[in-house]
Image: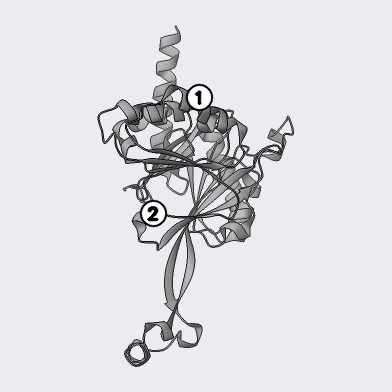
Amino acid sequence: MTTPQFPLQDQLCGFSRALFSTWLYHRRFNILFDAGEGVASTLYNRVFGIRRVFLSHGHADHIAGLVNLINIRNLGAGDQTAPLKIFYPQNNKLIEYVVDYLSRTQKDLSFGLEWIPLDADQEIVLDDQKSRIFMRTFRTRHSQRQLSLGYNIIEIRRRLKEQYQGLPQREINEMIWSKGKDEVAQEFEKIIFSYGGDSRPIVPEYIKDTLFLCHECTYLSVDDDERNFQQHSFLDEVLETAKKARVETLLLFHTSLRYNLDMLREKIDSAVARINPGCRILVLYGDSIIDTACSLSWKKKLKRERIREKKLEENSD
């Protein structure tokens, strides 16, 4: 039995563990979401493919990889002239410190580097997609002191107008020939990818009907937030959010290091049976994307984890 493929298996890679590092690279759009430590040392020369970076907020585990990312693009064996745009929540002091540091230490870059502050509900046209696909920001709830943002990739699509739905294809074709496509069909916005960064549950209306939602899931239970910071999400409320938003595929990330794979599998299976979110569920665990409905996917990751733990034990002896 082969491992089932999910829609972005050949387009998405990343790493995420709460407190340590989070980043996600979408190859189809050459977009990096957040830039935690290790992004450049993991992607190697693939960093030259990145054209845009979208930062959700300024905490170290989401921006610590920026310095090396820019340095490698400037000195590594790749297209050192490819421009890079970095978008970030406006007035975010932590990110502005990094901008200031890089402007002082990387004065002679071989490529154009542009820092672009954003507010909620702003749109960025992805020019290489012929203006049919664009990014729209939305506000997330993480830090009370700083703006944090989530991002939707939206595609302009066409569909039959309601009054023509259900008609035989022959009649529809005749109407197109006699009245034109604009009479028969209309354009609409379809969210094809959503990334929330660190946050409390995203407002379902912001991500309604998205094909693919990346939502943090730091805790498996509300009681696990023992410091009561209320800056992160727990499993049940993430699944409820996905259910209300009618998400097609949900990727959980930013899980706490306190949970091993066995705990994750048990809690996710139990919560899914109880809440029935109606979507496919994946987990970004370290650098692996696990399909929770596939036993083989869990087994492969468990095997790798046990090998890694054994090596760590041997090195510590």
Q: Amino acid at mark 2?
A: Pro
Report x, y in % for residue 251.
50, 47
The C terminus: image quadrant: top left
Q: Is residue 75 left or right of residue 106?
A: left
The answer to which quarter of the image holds residue 68 is: top left
Q: 295 and 305: which one is in front?
A: 305
Q: Residue at x 65, y 39 (%)?
A: 232
Considering depth in this image, is 41 or 290 the residue closer to the camera? 41
Residue identified by numbered label 2: 7
Location of residue 271 in the rendering, given as x and y in whole percent from the top left corner: 61, 48
Q: Which residue is mark 1?
A: 101
User: Pointers 1 and 2 in contact (CB under 8 A)?
Assistant: no
Measured along the vertical axis of the image, is residue 71 above or below residue 46?
above
Q: Position of residue 312 (x, y in %)?
A: 43, 16
Quarter residue 243 falls in: bottom right
Report the residue that reaches farthest toward the top. 317
> What's the residue at 33%, 47% (across, down)?
10
Residue 260 visible in image: no
Secondary structure at badge 2 equals: loop
Q: At 67% from the left edge and 39% from the top edge, which residue is drawn? A: 221
Closest to the observer: 123 or 294?
123
